[in-house]
Structures are given as C-alpha cells and as structure tokens.
C-alpha cells in the first residue's frame, strides 16, 4: 500500500507548471522518467524501510525476467547514488549487487500491476484532446492561436484534473463528441 501511495511522489516537482499552463517536459534518468528514480531517492533520504523502496522501484517494471530486473536494479543504484548510500549494505540489492534481495518479494509485482492506469489514461488524453479543442473553439471562443497556449491549456487542465482524461474518454466512447460537452461545461461554464 505504501509503495503504491508514494510511487509517483516526485511528479509535482518534475512536471512543474510553466507560464503557458503546460507542464515541464520530463527528463529521463537511468533509462526511465526521472520522477521514478527521484521518488526512490527521496524515500532513501527519509530512511524508509528497504522492502518499501524495493517494492516501489518495481512500479515501472516487474523483476520477473533478467532484463526487467536489471532495469529495476539500475533505478535502485541510481537512487542510492543520489541519496549517498550503499545499495547492498542498505538491503536494496542482493550481496552480489546484481539482483533484488533474494528470494524476490511479491509486493513489487503488485505495485507494478497497480500502476497500470497508464495503458488507458495516456491514450485517453491523445484521443480526447482533438475533441476538446473543437469544443473549445465552438463553445469557449478560443482562437486557433490560443489553442497552442495558456487559454486552451488552462481549460484542458481544469477538465482533466477535476474529471480525469479517462472519464472524458468514457463520455466520448459512449456518445461521441457531443457527450464531451456536458462534462466540460460542468467544470468550466462557457461565458
Ligand atoms: Fe511513475
Ligand atoms: Fe504511476
């Protein structure tokens, strides 16, 4: 539960709002989104138990194959470097330094599966943005130029943050673009 709750701890920092109401582009670190490694480092600095840190490290992939486990090991090593600790002595890795502590615990697999909203939530954004742009122009008098900047970004942020992209996609899937109007209007009333 703790691994699941804390696993994206650093997203508010790496995705900081920009002046045009877009979010900062995330950099990669040790081959994954930087928020992942930084969240692990944060837990290490705060002296969280090793089994929690290892379970959380599995959010972005499971340690079920040699290649996948090698990635998790790298993220833990990178986090340990940032936090200034020895990953083996801290119980994050097996004595060899090449695998997770053995035998492998199952919490990491559960955390990985629990992190799977992205298979729908990420494409839901791509599929619903064009529909929201059309409604923004028709109902909110947002110009083509403003679709690329703060006016549309602010509208989009309000709708997605209060209802979620998945809920907008569900409305779109059930009733087409017309059905997206209602939830948008419920969050931001057109003038
Ligand atoms: Fe993540
Ligand atoms: Fe996540």
Image (cartoon, helix red, strand yellow):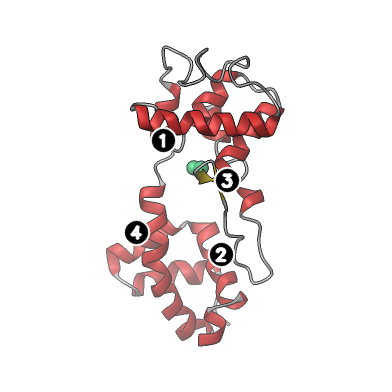
Q: Looking at this view, is 27 or 49 the one in front? A: 27
* Label whose residue precedes the other's in the sequence (2 or 1): 1
- Residue at coordinates 42% horizontally, 33% vertically from top-left? 112
* Label whose residue precedes the other's in the sequence (4 or 3): 3
Instruction: Establish if 73 lies above or below 12.
Output: above
Name the image quarter holding residue 88. Answer: top right
User: Is the residue at mark 4 in contact range of ligand 2, meaning its CB lies under 8 Å from it?
Assistant: no
Which disc number belongs to residue 157? 2
Q: Which residue, given by chain and number where applicable, does mark 3 sit on?
A: 34
Q: Quadrant of the C terminus?
A: bottom right
- Residue at coordinates 67% horizontally, 34% vertically from top-left? 82
Instruction: Establish if 60 lies above or below 108.
Output: below
Residue 182 in the image: x percent, y percent? 43, 70
Disc 3 is placed on an element classified as: helix
Residue count near mark 1 (Cα–Cα under 10 Å), binned few <14, some 14–19, many ≥20: some
Using the rendered image of the protein, determine whether residue 141 is visible from the camera's viewpoint: no
What is the CA distance from the residue labelled 4 to the residue labelled 3?
Answer: 30 Å
Instruction: Establish if 191 lies above or below 126.
Output: below
Instruction: Establish if 153 lies above or below 191.
Output: above
* Label whose residue precedes the other's in the sequence (1 or 4): 1
* Label whose residue precedes the other's in the sequence (1 or 3): 3
Q: Looking at this view, is 181 or 142 the one in front? A: 142
Q: Which residue, given by chain and number where applicable, does mark 1 sit on?
A: 61
Disc 1 is placed on an element classified as: loop
Using the rendered image of the protein, determine whether residue 12 is visible from the camera's viewpoint: yes
What is the CA distance from the residue labelled 1 to the residue labelled 3?
Answer: 14 Å
């Amino acid at each position: 539960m703790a691994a699941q709750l804390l696993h994206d701890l650093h997203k508010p920092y790496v995705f900081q709002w920009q002046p045009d109401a877009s979010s900062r582009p995330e950099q990669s670190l040790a081959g994954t989104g930087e928020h992942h490694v930084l969240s692990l480092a944060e837990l290490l600095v705060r002296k969280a138990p090793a089994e929690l840190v290892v379970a959380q490290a599995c959010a972005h992939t499971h340690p079920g194959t040699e290649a996948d486990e090698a990635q998790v090991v790298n993220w833990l090593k990178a986090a340990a470097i940032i936090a200034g600790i020895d990953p083996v002595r801290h119980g994050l890795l097996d004595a060899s330094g090449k695998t997770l502590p053995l035998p492998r615990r199952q919490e990491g697999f559960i955390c990985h599966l629990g992190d799977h909203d992205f298979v729908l939530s990420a494409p839901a954004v791509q599929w619903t943005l064009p529909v929201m742009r059309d409604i923004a122009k028709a109902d909110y008098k947002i110009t083509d130029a403003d679709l690329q900047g703060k006016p549309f970004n602010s509208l989009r942020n309000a709708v997605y943050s209060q209802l979620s992209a998945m809920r907008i996609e569900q409305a779109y899937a059930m009733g087409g673009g017309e059905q997206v109007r209602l939830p948008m209007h419920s969050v931001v009333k057109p003038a």
